Image (cartoon, coloured by chain):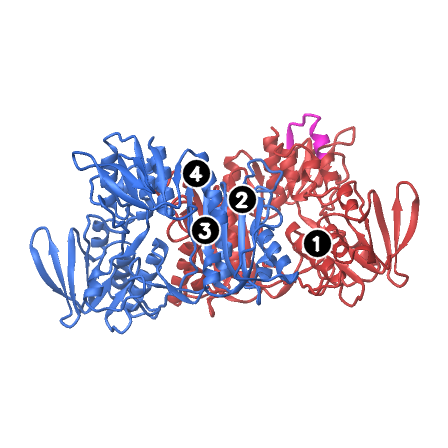
Chain colours: A blue, B red
Amino acid sequence: MGERLLVIGGDAAGMSAASQAKRLRRDALEVVVLERGPWTSYSACGIPYWVAGDVPDADALVARTPAQHRANGIDVRLRTEATGIDLDAGQVEVRDADSGRQRLGFDQLMIATGAVPVRPAVPGIDCRGIYGVQTLDDGCRLIDGLRGAPRRAVVVGAGYIGVEMAEALLRHGLEVTVIDQAGEPMSALDPDLGRLVREAMEKMGIGLVLSTPVEAFEADASGGVRAVAAGGATYESDVVVLGLGVQPETSLARAAGLPLGARGALRTEASMRVRGQAAVWAAGDCVESFDRVSGTWVHVPLGTHANKQGRVAGLNIGGRDAAFPGIVRTAISKVCDLEIARTGMGEADVQAAGLSYVTSTIETTTRAGYFPGTAPMTVKLLAESATGRLLGAQIVGREGSAKRIDTCAVALWSRLSVEQLMMCDLSYAPPFSSVWDPVQLAARAVVGKLVAGEPVAAEPVTGG
Amino acid sequence: MGERLLVIGGDAAGMSAASQAKRLRRDALEVVVLERGPWTSYSACGIPYWVAGDVPDADALVARTPAQHRANGIDVRLRTEATGIDLDAGQVEVRDADSGRQRLGFDQLMIATGAVPVRPAVPGIDCRGIYGVQTLDDGCRLIDGLRGAPRRAVVVGAGYIGVEMAEALLRHGLEVTVIDQAGEPMSALDPDLGRLVREAMEKMGIGLVLSTPVEAFEADASGGVRAVAAGGATYESDVVVLGLGVQPETSLARAAGLPLGARGALRTEASMRVRGQAAVWAAGDCVESFDRVSGTWVHVPLGTHANKQGRVAGLNIGGRDAAFPGIVRTAISKVCDLEIARTGMGEADVQAAGLSYVTSTIETTTRAGYFPGTAPMTVKLLAESATGRLLGAQIVGREGSAKRIDTCAVALWSRLSVEQLMMCDLSYAPPFSSVWDPVQLAARAVVGKLVAGEPVAAEPVTGG
């Protein structure tokens, strides 16, 4: 073997990079992957559905096993943790259960260390019975915890993970309370659409405690969590799930002096090469991504980006010339039968950027109004006043609503105006859509406001 | 009133134009609509679902009634037929049931005469029991015909209307045979995807007689159809539905000397003004549209275009400056639980245009592979070899497959390459998609072929 590629982290980003590089350079490249856990290439996004019982076991969430990667010539080392990076020496310090500490040399280094759940710095956070849901190990621990027939759960945080876990625990038969500092759940949405999510969750029987920070976790005599203190009240709880989102796991990168952005994520070129480094690459939940809509660098830890970025890094390590072109901040989720999606900038983003904008929110249906099974959906669009350029889209609705966000995502990607989006040739038949597609109906409403010459400077306009 | 706008045809295109023009010019414009039938603004696309019993009656398919239009100041005249256009005199010859013939003057003329079902020129075509499904009147006649408890139906033509009507008649309890000249159903798809539709229809119990022209309709003693002769065989049939598509209804326009394209559809500017005319406009199923992908003018009679084109004409008549930017030939349909969608060019189109291209077809799933309810879907993409530009997309699959075509439609609209489509930020969560969206998986397969330098000149490549 000529060179060695050392990959830290064996999930989506790391294994995508490893696979592409190995495929292209074969015997000319030794690829060693260090993975802290016992799994590779798994779907962390599937954990809520595993907890809910939709998915039978952790193995179902594994897209490619260590054995499958090894069959492709990749040296996967499980339960093996990188504990330090020595850039000058070109070595990584490694600890595993069997052989203890050692140093491994590299010619190319791929950092795919992912992210870790945000843990609130409040008393009692280390009680037994408080779970993150970021890795399959986390999922195993939570599912073990649920075997003790708990009655009440508190989810801390009402973002994507929080609402998905609320559904999972509800379906598990628990009484569920979600606590969040924000005034509405799903702060990735504007509050007017967040309100729709709140109302739907309340109807599902999920308790919501909003505008309320968690103050402490209280333990019983055995050290297990028994209640959550928040906003002066106490919420009894046998299980706590942390749904506060994640922060990049870049402690090794930081210690090695690699460049980090405002949120602590690694800064890379479009090639996924770490800035200022010739032979160090990074991808996935531990890096910043360029937001094509706002023109800023952001930290958006999602499996889609991890896969694409890892692939780009691997192609480049393999000698190709690939670039990751950035993101538009598309995301989708559901809580029971309510679907939720967003892309681009929200009102707070637009206001922070000082852009003058117009917005419209419409209530429509997923199918032709007269078609059986048609269901309500709400679409909100934002456009720049001066140019009509689409800035963002948000959808909340019943089955068949949310995936329509992709239409807006491609429009944002291509910098279409709302007028152009309105005139696109989208598909129509009564079982699938109204004749003016829901997204285009919303675009029409925004175009109407733009034409009427009623631009709004840094102040929301909703309804329409 | 200053000017008079005369609109011929009271469905989507005509009423969209009438509504926009009236809204903008109010009392300064008299708007008179001549409609041959008794309805306005109805969903012809809903007829198969009305026949199937999904929709209770014709009224449910009416988006806006004559009375509602009249309340907006539009003079809607039902059961009133235009029989001639005198451009020099600025008059239309009109026939109605009450007052017989008269001439109505116009300052602006909007032609929205739509389309009529193609009727094969074979013996017996005028038998009782042979139905088109283009207008609500057609739908009424067919539903009346089904009251006689027919046992067997033949659908002539296996395009969108044909497959939708096959489902409708099947659900009505009839034994259904579909006869088509082509080798596979859904000739809007490439034959390899048409095959998937055929196999699914056969499993549904629909008889398919392909590569077979209809030769004659045979009548019983009372003049009602009793069988269809095709390819030397005879198919007994109590009801025949014509699903051969439609041709533009432009006999008045032709007689008036207005410019028609190759398929007999009116030629317009992007403003929807008829070419060479100052005060004559046209929109909907009777006009040609510019295909942005192939750069040619085509006849694509769909309600989506009719609505948008009618709106553009009305805005221009109303004094605004609007343009219809063309289409990308997106269409969607379903037959029972099989969803079908396409956009852009197919292989035959690309070959006819002399373009060198690459194509790939992938088998994937509608949700994460491990998610309950995940279902198979097939995605085929075509790209130009030299540039990688996306040329077309086709999808056949189970619930949740087809509407994803809109992602490709916006990509085509924006002239994205398959590489760009592959890297777009599409939404992902396990209930909605695999982590590489199905469309992006297909794009990856095409990109792989483009990179490998295996362009295909005028010859299909499938699989991948």
Above-or-below relation of B262 to B49 = below
- The x, y position of residue B286, in whole percent, is 73, 55
Q: Is residue B192 left or right of residue B314?
A: left
Q: Is residue B102 magenta?
A: no
Q: Earlier in the sequence, mark 3 or mark 2?
A: 3
Q: Amino acid at mark 1?
A: Gly
Marks 4 & 1 on one chain = no
Highlighted magenta segment, given as a residue range: B142-153
Mark 3 and mark 2 residues within 8 Å of each other at the beta carbon: no
Report the chain holding disc 2: A
Q: Is residue B457 left or right of residue B8?
A: left
Above-or-below relation of A237 to B4 = above
Using the image, tell me which numbered label, if any, was put on residue A377. Answer: 2
What is the distance, in whole Å, between disc 3 and disc 2 at their CAs? Answer: 15 Å
What is the distance, in whole Å, between disc 1 and disc 2 at their CAs? Answer: 28 Å
What is the distance, in whole Å, between disc 2 and disc 4 at their CAs? Answer: 16 Å
Q: What residue is shown with label 1?
A: B284
